[in-house]
Amino acid sequence: MNQKGNAMIYIGKFLYTTNQQAKDETRRRHGEFNLLVSAEDKNAALAIFKERIGESQTSTEFFEGVSLIYLIHMLEMDEVPSDRAKMFNFQSVAGDPVMPIISCQAPSGEGDGCRILDWQKNRPGVDGQAATPFMQFGK
């Protein structure tokens, strides 16, 4: 909660792989998505994110077969700015899609918070370190 006792706004950025057991490479998918929630604290936001992803897995075809979901970063804001738009999830992609992505969580004049996202063997890495799954479906 912020100093006024109000809930905070949380934006989570996730990467995922899905249907990785498929022999045909065109059936395998990977990508990213964002989730937004107002919650009392970070732990409550993470629980709500997990619940929503679980609902999506059972009610949509987004996460078919073997799926891994990775939380790359989470923004916390006490309010949505009304006088100036807030930039977030800026990405700069070099060359072909197989090249690493430079991703900035919330670039601003104070700092850009950029990280290098890279896929190695269908698993994302962040700044050269393998990402740990946030959730997993299937075997």
Image (spheres, rainbow, N blue to C red):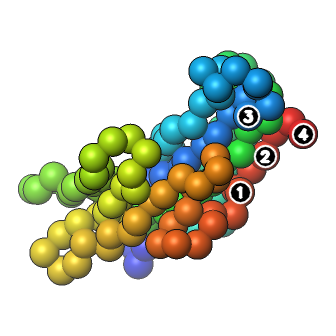
Residue at 13% x, 75% y: name it: 109
Badge 1 element: loop
In space, the residues marked 1 and 2 are separated at their CA atoms by 7 Å
Tell me the mark number nearer the camera, choosing from 2 and 3.
Answer: 3
Q: Considering depth in this image, is 35 or 112 the residue closer to the camera?
A: 112
- Compared across the picture, whether 71 is left or right of 115 comes to right
Locate residue 123, reporting x and y percent. Answer: 64, 53
Locate residue 37, reporting x and y percent. Answer: 50, 48
Residue beneath label 2, please?
Answer: 136
Residue at 32% x, 69% y: name it: 114
Q: Considering depth in this image, is 6 or 87 the residue closer to the camera?
A: 87
Say if mark 1 contacts mark 2, CB within 8 Å.
yes
Work out whether 28 lies above or below 61. Answer: below
In space, the residues marked 2 and 4 are separated at their CA atoms by 8 Å
Q: What amino acid type should be assigned to the residue bearing mark 2? A: Gln
Q: What amino acid type should be assigned to the residue bearing mark 3? A: Gln
Work out whether 51 lies above or below 70. Answer: above
Badge 2 element: strand
In space, the residues marked 3 and 4 are separated at their CA atoms by 10 Å
**Neighbourhood count class around disc 1 (C-alpha, 10 Å): few under 14, some 14–19, many 20 upward:** some
Residue beneath label 3, please?
Answer: 20
Residue at 60% x, 21% y: name it: 26
In space, the residues marked 2 and 3 are separated at their CA atoms by 12 Å
Residue beneath label 4, please?
Answer: 139
In space, the residues marked 1 and 4 are separated at their CA atoms by 14 Å
Residue at 64% x, 46% y: name it: 122
Q: Which mark is residue 133?
A: 1
Mark 1 or 4, nearer chain start: 1
In space, the residues marked 3 and 1 are separated at their CA atoms by 14 Å
The quarter of the picture where the C terminus appears is top right
